[in-house]
C-alpha cells in the first residue's frame, strides 16, 4: 500500500496510519488551506497508539478501500495523536461532549476548514448498525449537506464554536475551608465498592489521585474507613487481572467490577501515579503489599519502559497479532509447558486457571482456553491452605514467575509507544524520587536524575521553555501546562530526595516561565497553551482530575511547595488566586477534583517546615531523615543544610542563611504553621517533636 503523508511524522500512532488508503494529512496550516481552497469539510480523527478501539476502527474503516473512498471524496482527512497534542484533543473532546453528551477515543469530528466542529462521535463502524451511525452513511450525509445546506452547517458550526469557550470557563468563589474536603470524602465513600474495592460500577479505573486524597483525609481525621478504602482498592488491583503478575505493571483499566478483565494497554502515567499512591500507603504501614507493588512497578518501568538515554517511554499496546491481550493470557497447555506439569498443577488453583478459560469478553462471550492470571485471595491466605510459610510461597512463585516471563518473552510483543513526553516523564521522575526515600533505594533517585537531565538537555530551550515530545532525535511541540506542572513536580520531589539545590532552582525557574507563558491574568489559573498558539478556536484550560490530575491541580501543589521552600509569599499569592478562581466549580462536585483538593489540604492544614542543619551523610542526619521518610506527613516540607550547600541554599531560601552548621553536630529547626519552635540537637528529641511520637518510628 502506498504511503500517505503521515509517513513523514514521528508519532507511532500517526505512523500506524501511514499506509491506510485514507489520504491522511497532519494538522498544519497547509492542510487547512487545502480544505479551504477545495471547499471541503475536515474529517478530524484523534486517538493514540495503544487505544484498542482506535485499532478496531482503523481495521474496519480506515484500512477499508470503500470507506476510504468515501472519506477522501467528501473530506480532507486529518489524524492527530492526542498524546502529542493534548490541546487539540481538549478542545474537540469538549465539542464532542457538548454535541453528543459523551466522549472517548477514537474521537471523530466533522468540521469546517476554519476548524469549527459541526458533528462529533467516538467509534464509528464502517456502516450503520445497532443504532450507531456508520462512517459511509455519515460521509454521504455530510457531502449532501455541505452542498445543499451549507448555511445550516455554518450556523451549527458557529453555534458550537460560540459555546466552546464556556467549556473552559470556571466559577470563582471565596476560598473554601475544610468542609469542602469533608464533602468530597462523603461523596467518595458513598461510591466505594465495599466488596471488590474501587469506586463506582464497571469499568473501573485506578484513579490513584483519589487514593492520595483519602490518605490525607485519614491523616487529618484519623477516620479508619478512609484508610480501609485505600488499602482494599490497592489490594484488589494488585490481586486482580489488571495487574500483570508475570511482568509487573498495571493495565489501563478493568472492564468488569472485579478488576479481572482489563484493557491491556499499559500507560506510563498509570505506573507513576499508582506507585506514588502505593508509596504513601506504605508509609501508613499496615501491610507490606503496597511497597512491594511500587517496587515491582519500578522494576517494570526501568526494565521495559526506559530509553537508552534514561528517559521514559509512553505506553505499551493492548494488542499483539491483532488480538487484544494475546501477549498476556495463557492456555493451560502454555502454562504447563512453561512450568512443567507438577509445578503448573500447584499454581493453577492459586491463579484460578481453567481448562476453558477464566473470563468472558466485554460482549459476554467466553474466551475459549484463555486465562488471565489473578489471585482470588492474598498469598498469606494461600500459604496457610497450602501448608507453607508466606515467605516460602513467595520464593516459589518468584521462581515460577521467572520461567513464565521467559516463556512469554518469546511471543510477539505489543507495540511500544517509544515517544518521550515531558509531562509523563515528570510524573515518573516524581514517583522514582519518592520511591528512593520511602523504600531506601538510592538507585531510584539516580534513575530519576538521569531522566530529569535528559529533559533539561533535550526538551528545554535556551529561552527557558520546555518542549512536549521527543522521538528519534526530534523534539517538537511547545510545552503545554501539563509539561511544566508535572515536570516541576518531579523536580521538587527530586530535591526532597537528594537535597541538591540545583533541582529546586530549576523548578522555580520553570515555574516562572509557566506563569509568564500560561497564566490567565484575567481569571486566574493556567491555560493549556500559550497566547501565541492561535491554532484552535478557543484557548483551553483544564481542571478536572481524570485519568491523570489536571495541570492546574498539580500547579497548585507546586506553588504552595515553592512558597514553603523559599519563604517567598508571591508563590502563595498565586496559589490563593487559583483556589478562588476555581472554588465555585469545585464546590459543585468536589470529588471530581481530588488532586486539587490535595493541594487545598496542603494550604489549609498547618504544615511542618523543617531545616536539618548538619553534615550530609552523618549518622544523626541520616537517622532523622530515615524517620521522616518512613512516616506519612504529606504537608511537611524538609530541607537539609550542610557545609556543601549552605551558600547556594541561602540564595534559594534566604531564611536558611542564619542557621548554623556545626561540624559533628546535627540540629533540626522546626516551624509549624507560622510559628517557629526552639531548635533541637538531641536526635531522639528531634524525632519525637517532629513526628509527634514518643517512640522512634519503625
Image: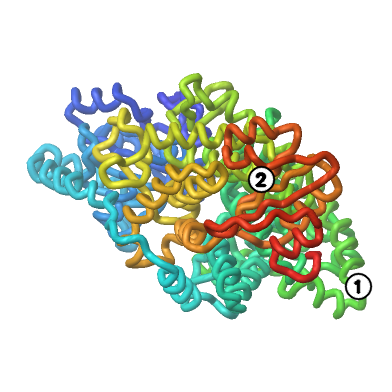
Q: Mark 1 or mark 2, which has the lower sequence index?
A: 1
> What x and y, as percent, mark residue 671?
60, 55
Q: Residue at x 73, y 69 (%)?
A: 693
122 and 127: which is toward the camera: 122
- Position of 668 relative to 540 (above/below): below
> What x and y, as percent, mark residue 119?
24, 48
Disc 1 is placed on an element classified as loop
> What x and y, as percent, mark residue 127?
33, 51
Task: Identify the residue position indicated by label 1 in the image.
Answer: 389
> What x and y, as percent, mark residue 277?
62, 59
Q: Residue at x 78, y 65 (%)?
A: 697
Task: Identify the residue position indicated by label 2 in the image.
Answer: 639
Question: From the viewer's perspective, is the residue at label 1 or at label 2 nearer?
Answer: 2
Left or right of 434? Residue 195 is left
Q: Quadrant of the C terminus?
A: bottom right
Q: Would you identify the image quadrant in which residue 23 lies?
A: top left
> In this rendering, does residue 125 appear at all?
no
Amino acid at each position: 500500500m502506498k504511503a500517505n503523508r503521515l509517513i513523514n511524522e514521528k508519532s507511532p500512532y500517526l505512523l500506524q496510519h501511514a499506509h491506510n488508503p485514507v489520504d491522511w494529512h497532519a494538522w498544519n496550516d497547509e492542510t487547512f488551506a487545502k480544505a479551504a481552497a477545495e471547499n471541503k469539510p475536515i474529517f478530524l480523527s484523534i486517538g493514540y497508539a495503544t487505544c484498542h478501539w482506535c485499532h478496531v476502527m482503523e481495521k474496519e474503516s480506515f484500512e477499508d478501500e470503500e470507506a476510504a473512498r468515501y472519506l477522501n471524496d467528501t473530506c480532507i482527512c486529518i489524524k492527530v495523536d492526542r498524546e502529542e497534542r493534548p490541546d487539540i484533543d481538549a478542545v474537540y473532546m469538549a465539542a464532542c461532549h457538548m454535541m453528543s453528551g459523551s466522549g472517548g477515543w477514537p474521537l471523530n469530528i466533522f468540521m469546517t476548514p476554519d476548524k469549527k466542529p459541526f458533528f462529533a462521535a467516538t467509534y464509528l463502524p464502517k456502516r450503520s448498525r445497532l443504532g450507531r451511525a456508520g462512517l459511509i452513511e455519515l460521509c454521504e450525509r455530510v457531502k449532501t449537506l455541505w452542498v445543499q445546506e451549507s448555511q445550516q452547517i455554518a450556523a451549527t458550526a458557529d453555534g458550537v464554536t460560540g459555546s466552546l469557550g464556556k467549556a473552559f470557563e470556571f466559577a470563582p468563589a471565596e476560598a473554601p475551608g475544610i468542609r469542602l474536603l469533608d464533602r468530597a470524602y462523603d461523596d467518595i465513600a458513598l461510591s466505594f465498592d465495599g466488596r471488590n474495592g474501587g469506586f463506582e460500577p464497571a469499568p473501573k479505573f485506578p484513579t490513584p489521585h483519589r487514593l492520595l486524597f483519602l490518605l490525607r483525609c485519614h491523616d487529618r481525621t484519623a477516620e479508619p474507613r478512609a484508610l480501609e478504602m485505600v488499602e482494599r482498592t490497592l489490594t484488589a488491583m494488585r490481586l486482580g487481572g489488571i495487574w500483570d503478575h508475570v511482568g509487573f505493571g498495571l493495565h489501563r483499566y478493568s472492564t468488569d467490577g472485579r478488576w479481572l478483565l482489563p484493557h491491556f494497554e499499559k500507560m506510563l502515567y498509570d505506573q507513576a501515579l499508582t506507585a506514588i499512591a502505593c508509596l504513601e500507603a506504605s508509609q501508613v504501614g499496615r501491610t507490606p503489599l503496597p511497597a512491594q507493588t511500587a517496587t515491582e512497578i519500578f522494576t517494570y518501568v526501568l526494565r521495559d519502559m526506559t530509553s537508552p538515554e534514561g528517559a521514559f517511554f509512553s505506553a505499551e499496546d493492548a494488542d499483539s497479532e491483532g488480538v487484544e491481550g494475546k501477549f498476556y493470557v495463557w492456555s493451560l497447555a502454555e502454562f504447563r509447558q512453561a512450568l512443567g506439569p507438577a509445578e503448573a498443577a500447584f499454581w493453577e488453583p492459586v491463579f484460578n486457571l481453567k481448562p476453558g478459560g477464566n473470563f468472558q469478553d466485554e460482549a459476554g462471550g467466553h474466551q475459549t482456553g484463555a486465562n488471565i492470571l489473578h489471585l482470588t485471595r492474598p498469598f498469606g491466605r494461600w500459604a496457610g491452605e497450602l501448608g507453607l510459610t508466606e515467605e516460602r510461597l513467595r520464593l516459589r512463585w518468584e521462581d515460577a514467575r521467572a520461567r513464565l516471563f521467559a516463556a512469554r518473552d518469546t511471543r510477539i510483543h505489543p507495540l511500544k509507544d517509544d515517544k518521550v513526553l515531558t509531562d509523563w516523564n515528570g510524573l515518573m521522575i516524581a514517583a522514582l524520587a519518592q520511591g528512593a526515600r520511602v523504600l531506601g533505594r538510592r538507585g531510584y533517585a539516580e534513575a530519576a536524575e538521569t531522566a530529569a537531565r535528559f529533559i533539561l538537555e533535550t526538551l528545554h530551550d535556551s529561552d527557558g521553555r520546555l518542549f512536549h515530545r521527543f522521538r528519534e532525535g526530534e523534539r517538537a511541540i511547545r510545552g503545554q501546562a501539563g509539561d511544566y506542572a508535572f515536570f516541576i513536580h518531579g523536580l521538587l520531589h527530586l530535591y526532597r530526595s537528594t537535597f541538591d539545590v540545583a533541582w529546586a532552582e530549576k523548578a522555580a525557574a520553570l515555574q516562572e516561565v509557566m506563569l509568564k507563558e500560561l497564566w490567565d491574568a484575567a481569571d486566574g489559573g493556567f491555560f493549556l497553551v500559550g497566547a501565541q498558539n492561535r491554532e484552535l478556536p478557543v484557548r483551553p484550560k483544564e481542571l478536572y482530575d481524570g485519568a491523570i490530575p489536571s495541570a492546574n491541580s498539580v500547579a497548585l501543589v507546586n506553588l504552595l511547595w515553592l512558597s514553603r521552600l523559599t519563604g517567598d509569599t508571591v508563590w502563595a499569592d498565586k496559589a490563593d488566586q487559583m483556589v478562588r478562581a476555581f472554588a465555585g466549580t469545585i464546590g459543585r462536585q468536589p470529588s471530581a477534583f481530588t488532586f486539587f483538593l490535595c493541594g487545598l489540604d496542603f494550604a489549609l492544614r498547618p504544615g511542618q517546615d523543617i531545616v536539618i542543619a548538619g553534615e550530609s551523610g552523618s549518622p544523626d542526619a541520616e537517622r532523622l531523615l530515615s524517620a521522616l521518610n518512613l512516616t506519612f506527613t504529606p504537608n511537611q516540607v524538609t530541607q537539609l543544610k550542610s557545609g556543601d550547600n549552605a551558600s547556594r541554599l541561602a540564595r534559594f531560601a534566604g531564611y536558611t542563611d542564619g542557621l548554623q552548621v556545626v561540624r559533628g553536630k546535627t540540629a533540626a529547626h522546626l516551624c509549624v504553621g507560622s510559628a517557629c519552635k526552639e531548635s533541637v540537637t538531641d536526635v531522639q528529641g528531634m524525632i519525637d517533636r517532629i513526628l509527634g511520637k514518643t517512640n522512634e518510628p519503625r
